[in-house]
Image (cartoon, coloured by chain):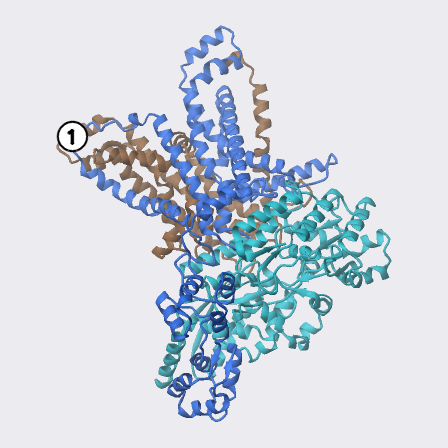
Amino acid sequence: MTISIIRSALMASAVVLAAGPVLAEDITITVWAGGSNESDSYRLEAIEMAADMLSRESAIAGQELNITVEKKLDFGDWPEFKQAVTLAAEAGTAPNIVVTSHLDIAPWSEAGYIVPVEDYLDLDSWPLNNIYDNLMAVAAFDDVQWGLPQDAESRPFFFWKETMRGIGYSDAEIAALPAKVEAGEYTLENVLADAKKAVEAGLVEEGYGFYPRVSNGPDYAQFYQSFGGELQDPETGKLVLDKTAMEAMYQFFVDAVAAGVTRKNHIGTDWSQWYNEVANGKAAMWHGGTWHYGRYTKTEGNTDFFGTIEFSLIPAGNANGRANTITHPLVYLVTNQETDRAEEIASQLIKIASEPRINSLHAIKSAHLGIAKEQSNIELYANDRWASMATERLLGAANAQPNHVQYGAFSEALWKGLEASWTGIKTPAEAIAEVEAELKATLGDEVIIR
Amino acid sequence: MRHNFRTWPLLLILSLVSLPLIIMYVFQVVDSFTAPKPGSLIPGAVTFENFRFLWETPDPGRSSIWQVTFNTFVFATSVAVIITSISMTAAYALSRLNFPARGFFLGGLIVLHGFPTVTLIIAIFLILQFLGLYDSLFGVILVKSALELPFGIWIMKGFYDTVPWEIEMAGVQDGASRFTVWRRLVLPQVQPGLSALFVLAFLLGWSEFVLPLVLAPGSDAQVLSTYLAALIADDSKLDFSLYKAVGMFYALPVIFIYLVFQKKLMNIYGGGTKG
Amino acid sequence: MKRINWLGLGLLAPAFCIVIFFFLAPVILTGFFAFTNMSTSTGVTGGEYVLNQTGLRAIEDKGLPEATLKQLKNAGYRVDAKGLAAMAEQFGENAAAEFAELHGDALFTSRRDMERALKDLRANQIRSTRDRKAAAELFKRSVLNERFATEDEFRAVLIEANINPADHDAIVMQAYSGWVWTKENIELIFTLPSSLRYAMNTLMYVGLTLSFNVLFGLFLAISIFYLPPRTSAIFSTIWFLPRVLPPVLYVLMWKWFTWDTGFIATTLSWVGVAPKNWMLDTSTHAWVVIVLINGFVGASLGMILFSSAIKAIPTSMLHASEVDGASRIQQARYIILPQLRWPILFVTSYQTLSLLTSFEYILLSTDGGPGRATEVWSLAAFHTALNNYGGNLQYGLGAAFAMLLVIIGIIASLTYLRFFNFREMIAKPRIEG
């Protein structure tokens, strides 16, 4: 935001004040949410609630402000959503507010599609000063606060308790698993061995010993970290391709296929089918996200989540790596609009939507984690067993993926490599060579290859 | 003349290879009207429950089916009108009139006719944006019409080519202008071609998927193809019966048109050859 | 001398305009884009000038002098005379005086600290957030994270900030956020191992689907010819429908047919085969399904064209052969096939081109999977430029992919043009002639 715009806005408001009572102001705020379905409806409805609140506040301040909120969440999938937002922004018809991955901040800010919320909001004021600092950091890029975190989550590893019992674990041992994982005593090697036992004992079908995510996603960066990989070099801020870690990670999935515990054709499995299977014990071990709790217990009919499922961090892969989990918060971003006023109101709306009470509605309905400290004092949130357990067990060890302009290309390349080795089209070594060539060519100096 | 041959072996082979399609059609219809029974092929009880999307919106945030249907109808009709009316004039010029660079235009038409179209979508986006037509139904209509236009002209030219010269000669000798001759004498001759092209262009518009997907992602301009695709992509439920019911609704006009215009369509595909 | 009819141009004009705008212009633009580095982060419509941490790091790597770097990094917000004067003008002498007393000559590295400092005002509080932010801007001396619309504006600020003029060019170049011309896309396509794979996939896709279309179209046409009219009408409907049904619905039917819980899996589970996804199980499955999905659509074209060609064969020839005792296969081989040479050639050349560039059915069914095994060239162009999980849309690279297809398309069309007797088509109009 240039000085001149702020200055003219300032003058405009001075003129308004001088002119005395003002006419009613009507404004339409469009909000689009990606990767969302019905249970995430509060991503949009929170904005509606905030609009109501802001109108009331304005009315008391003597200004009539009518805000119409237009919502859209039925985008096919993430790629379609991002394509839609990007092209709309290019065409100057971007929605005022978007709910999207924090990874979009870097490219979208570079392209000028979004404006920093810090141009409009006092970050030291309520409720922003109550949001966890690390989450605020995730919504910032290059020291500028571009957006506000919309929710938090992390991506745990799950065990089906009955199957674990079937291969010889006692209840106490199962309960101790999360701690053993965290300490690095239970690793992905154990995962393979146990999954194999479960398949061989006939407790789960072949290919269901370890049942990973079916498409590209931050989850796979976790496995890279499990083998000691690092995503970003803390000193230079460049992306890092650790070839040893990456190859070990690819190899892990190849081994899982070879051992018959993971299906070779697993990628591309239908999500609905996948959810249904893991929620009802068809898989021995798998990984997912904290929001899966809501899905398993509501849609998929698993009424005894805590009695049937144990969860932990993603285990370490080998001695180089660590047990970890990635948090991938969605963020509210305000897009660049023709009038400063629209940006200002959009910023106010996302601020109000970040109220702990409003955010708790989303957190509990969609089984995400809260964004603000005070949410532990909201009964709805505090009484939720899953939210409190998941926060305690996972969030401490959680890190986020780096906000970097080229991270999308980086992650896409890593996934291509994994896909090729997993499906047996290439060996891990060949896949790594191709990934290296591709990253060198497309990212150039912005990636460090080790 | 075919009495020498027994037809049943041929019939058998043909039925066998057609079996997948027949199964798909049959279950498409049956599943949309019966209760879903996962893991079984025997249909459940007859129900209209799968069609509930017609009177209630499946999820908040999804557009109403009637708005979407209306959009699709406007889209398909406009495409048909534009393609038919423009092809009607342009094809006549190419077929019958002598004007500068006619050969060039004809050659260009043939090059465009068999041309990669969807690969141009990035550039098309930019042009729409430049014209302020991005994310509007009108923009997609123009693009779809433009991309199918060479095909339309090609077909119409084929129809004009079959009109006997004598009709025009006679008209010109009676002192009518070329324009009048075209309007009064030639157009009635190609009327079957025009209606066939109209129907075909309507179908092309009705089925189009990639263009609205990329060029009109907002909710205002959604059409049935993107609606159905978004429904299928939504991972919160896998409900083939619902998809099939929506598909049934989507396909109704197509089937109707097919039944009525079957001959015409086959004919035009044969002449126009759209792969 | 031929008469020229200007009406022709008039009648052609609407078509000409619309084709120019939405067809030729995109072709030309695609050619231009292919030589740019356009992507999500550069935007399409031209750039602005903004220097952020990332940019700073990049020019540091390129050897920007330490002094300049420090200057850029540490400018921050300074409560200096110039800022205070501006503040006095906008917020009153008193506010400026009080602020000078509180934080005169202070240097704040971050905007947040600057705003906090402004909150220290007691007698002359700035209450509204907007106003406070505006006040903070008055003291901003850093050029970081600020967007400038033009190069001149940006250079002016660099001069004002006393940056060594020798370094301006490097800084300006780095700060430009828009796209630039480059030849890298083409080079990239020829060096990336993945593009070779896409090319091979495309060859395989076109080759297999085309063979299926022609052979199966022939089979259909000949069988339909020999069947009684009523029966043949049923079969031609069955095989014509895939062409008229909307692709989304048609592919949905295939999904249902091949899904883990779909028809094939359920039927085979009766004989003890474990259910699996028959579309995406291995790359072979995916290829078979892709070829069938496209082939079932394409075969009808062959069916229609070949049927009408067969009907044109004089029945006397067939009668004669029957009298000679020719079997049906012999009849097809020696009488029908030779008559179909031209239609076959036409279908082949026509469909080569359209298959080369079509990706709709693949996008809807396998989306290039599993493991990019069915990612064809045109789909790769689409994914690169418009549709991927990272949301990293590389328009430039995608356009380069598309451009190669466009070139192939033009060359192929021109070749066909020679081949299929263009002269005959442009037979001179008789009235003017």
Name the residue that disc number 1 marks. C2
Instruction: Give the quadrant of the C terminus of chain A.
Output: bottom right
Instruction: Give the quadrant of the N terminus of chain A.
Output: bottom left
Mark 1 element type: loop
Q: Name the residue nearer the viewer: B40 or A58.
A: A58
Q: Is residue B85 above or below residue C102?
A: above
Instruction: Classify residue A165 by image quadrant.
Output: bottom right
Q: Is residue B173 above or below residue A248?
A: above
The chain whose colour is cyan is A
Q: Residue at x 75, y 55 (%)?
A: A318
The chain whose colour is brown is B
Q: Residue at x 50, y 62 (%)?
A: C58
Q: Residue at x 46, y 47 (%)?
A: C185
x then y, percent, for residue C234: 51, 29
Is residue A125 visible from the viewing direction of this image?
yes
Give the chain of mark 1: C
Q: Name the residue nearer the viewer: B200 or A116.
A: A116
Badge 1, how many Cα within 10 Å: few under 14, some, many 20+? few
The chain whose colour is blue is C
x then y, percent, for residue C311: 42, 20
Determine whether, in the image, residue A409 is placed left or right of residue A284.
left
Q: Is residue B227 above or below residue B83?
A: below
